[in-house]
Image (cartoon, helix red, strand yellow):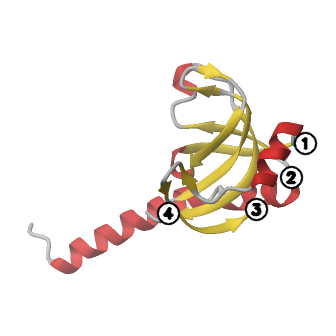
Amino acid sequence: MRLGVVEIGLVVAVACASSAFGQSKFEAPLCEAAKTGRVVEMVYDKDASKGCAPRLVDVHQVAIGNNGKLYMHGYQTRGCTKGRDYASKRIFRLDKTKSVELIDGAFGEKSQAVKLEGWDGCIGSNCFIEKNICE
């Protein structure tokens, strides 16, 4: 069976839509957290296979990258990062996020200071955020 241009285009469109849907299911709870100053418990990428506890993240912003993927900027207070458990500001790709749950908790002092600084969508000179969705 040989696929034509229309069939190939349809396969590509469905694949892209599936990827966007997979990451967009977390957009609503993350935006709620960002707008209300709430904390989320999340499982990210390969955390479970590394034996890591779920991450606790103060959500500061949710945005769309230049590549069309969704990103979250926030302050992580618990969870593995390169095999270590430490607090720091972080950027997460939503397509690598496995689960998100809003939990009780408030932003710590350091997290509030990071949020007040804002984020311009850059890491050093690499600017990759096209549009902010919520904060």
Q: Position of residue 87 (x, y in %)?
A: 72, 29
Residue 87 horizontal side relative to residue 93, left or right: right
- Residue 108 in view: no
* Amino acid of disc 3: Glu
Q: 10 Å neighbourhood of mark 4: few (<14), some, or many (≥20)? A: some
Are the residues at dot 2 and dot 3 in contact (C-beta closer than 8 Å)? no
CA distance for labels 4 and 2: 25 Å
Q: Are marks 4 and 3 in contact (CB under 8 Å)?
A: no
Q: Residues within 10 Å of mark 3 (few under 14, many from 20)?
A: many
**Residues at discs 3 and 1 in contact (Cβ within 8 Å):** no
The CA distance from mark 2 to mark 1 is 7 Å
Q: Across the whole image, how many numbered discs are drawn on residues?
A: 4
Q: Answer yes or no: do the residues labelled 2 and 1 have beta carbons within 8 Å?
A: yes
Quadrant of the rendering where the N terminus is positioned: bottom left
Residue carrying label 3: 135
Q: Amino acid at mark 2?
A: Gly
Which of labels 4 and 3 is toward the front?
Answer: 3
